[in-house]
Amino acid sequence: MKRVTEKTFSQSFSIVGREFFDAGKVSTEIKTMLKELGVDAGIIRRIAIAMYEAEMNVVMYATEATVTLELSPKAIRIVVDDRGPGIPDVELAMQEGYSTATTEMREMGFGAGMGLPNIKKNADHFRIDSVVGKGTRLEISISMN
Amino acid sequence: MKPDFRSIRIDTERCTGRMKCLRICPTQALRVRNAKAKLLSDRCIDCGECVRVCPNHAFVPQTSSFSDFSGFKYTIALPSPVFYSQFGKDVKPSAILSALKTVGFDDAYDVACASESVSIAIQEYLEANGTPRPLISPFCPTIVRLIQVRYPNLLDNLIPIESPMEIAAREAKRAKMHELGLKENEIGAIYLSPCPSKMIALKNPPRKKHSFLDGVMPIADVYPNMMRALSHSDHTNGKSEIRGLGLGWPIVGGQVASLKAEESIAIAGLTDVMRVFDEIENGKLKDIQYIECHSCPTACVGGSLTVENPYIARGRVLRMVEKYGQEPCQDRQKIRDLYQKNFFSLVGRIAPSPVQPLDEDLSRGIQKMHRRQQTYELLPKIDCGACGAPSCMTFAEDVVKGEAEADECVFLAMKSFESMSTNLLDVVGKHSKKIRGNIAS
């Protein structure tokens, strides 16, 4: 008889663009799950910061996004797939301090231009693919040890 | 391992399983099993919500009573500044303090003045230390415990400054040792507390240090005798020797008002506190210098061991601050010098105390999380609590951990009844048709 064991856990979340009321919710939900698993506090902090930045990017610029979380004993993998304007020059967006945030966003404390570099800094693996007019797909993973 | 001291114990004789505690507990630390409440100690943060809500008073605060102090040669009462707000309008704080000497204590020592010193010390600390930001006030033991249990990343944000009650206890004892020639252990310092969580400072201080306190008594326990003592004369006229902004500490914003830190905020109530802590963990609020945090929504005047309506008490505190708050009780320069001599410093780290994970082994934990989600999907998701767990998600977790059976959910049980009775009806239907058919022919 074949024994089925689930080595990974995956769950999807959705983020709605311009919905500031819920901003940060997905990040908090993922963080709570990692705490329930007893994951190291330092890893949780990195995930929290990276996920929050990614979530804010969707809320500020995109129409909507699907977040897929995959947990395995080795790593945490997160894919944020959004439907939105896309990034014309990814290299430029990856530079610290570069931002296209509006004055309104800046007044709310967002868009200091640290978003993408900050996500990369906190992740072990980082990959970004963007198509102008379609959307951006961000993939990060952080090793469990 | 010996479990940590918790400031609340359940009296199972009194518990009749009414489940009100289950719904109110902010950290899902309660279950009801066989009609009795059960405390999951690793999740409890000593907030006292259960003490407040239980109609049968089954949650017993683990505080002290007079009989605990019979071994001391001399006793000093240290009333929380909340105490000053519990008696009629305009009763002077100094009159309340001296009345304490007639209700069973040898002496009474003001804590509000120590709060003012601590405010000055916080300010010095903020000016000397640029990181981390924001710094968090460590004076509500429930907040410290919440951070230990749920936000270990924020432990370094707790400001390492001693609490006013400890400073006051130390100073009161030193003065009396000198004056009466007594040893420290011959003097009992008793804090009159608005909440049970202050007991943690005595029994299980997070930094594992010596406490100068010898007991924590509920304000409500001293209240009746105080009412009698205060009714004898007029205590409302004249100046109060007790003064300073420390009087404002028991209300939301009281600490912030006593500081000169520009970017400070005050938060009260665990829901809002947790929301702000999540934001800090996400890397936000770095421009805030100091956060005053209270577990109780109305801060200390709303503690579970107080008597007066918290809003009335708050009004009285504001009036006291207006009347007696503007003139300081401490010499600022003197306190700054003491700060430099580490008079207020706390040493040692606070260890995290995380909730027991789904499983000690990460890979098994992940499997359990998967099964928890599968179980959760079968549940009605209305958090009715009839199973004895506070929510469908916690119930699913209990099932996966083997602490509950899935059919303890009334909805799941009903579903299986339904399918069983459908089968039964099928069988009955088939047979009766056959039998009736036989008769008709």
Image (spheres, rainbow, N blue to C red):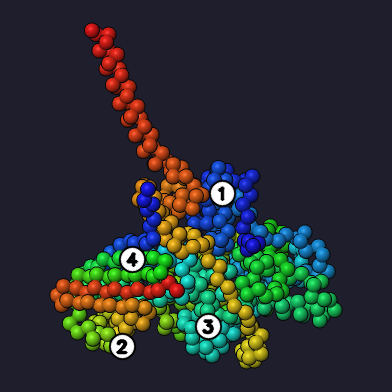
- Determine the secondary structure under disc 2: loop
Report the mark closest to the observer, 1 or 4: 4
| In-image side of B30 versus B278 (left or right) | right
Q: Is residue B87 visible?
A: no
- Determine the secondary structure under disc 4: strand
Residue drawn at (67%, 60%) of the image:
B63
Ranked by sequence position, the earlier of labels 4 and 2 is: 4
**Label 1 belongs to which residue?**
B37
Q: Which chain is indicated by disc 3?
A: B
Q: Which chain is indicated by disc 2?
A: A
- Determine the secondary structure under disc 3: loop
Separation of marks 2 and 1 at Cα, in angstroms: 54 Å
Ranked by sequence position, the earlier of labels 3 and 1 is: 1
| In-image side of A144 versus B419 (left or right) | right
Residue B425 vs A93, above or below: the answer is above
**Label 3 belongs to which residue?**
B259
**Where residue B55 appears, x then y in whole percent?**
56, 48
Separation of marks 3 and 2 at Cα, in angstroms: 36 Å
Report the mark closest to the observer, 4 or 2: 4
Q: Would you say the residues marked 4 and 3 are in contact, meaning their CB atoms lie under 8 Å apart?
A: no
Q: Residues within 10 Å of mark 2 (few under 14, many from 20)?
A: some
**Label 4 belongs to which residue?**
A69
- Determine the secondary structure under disc 1: strand
**Where residue B32 appears, x then y in whole percent?**
53, 47
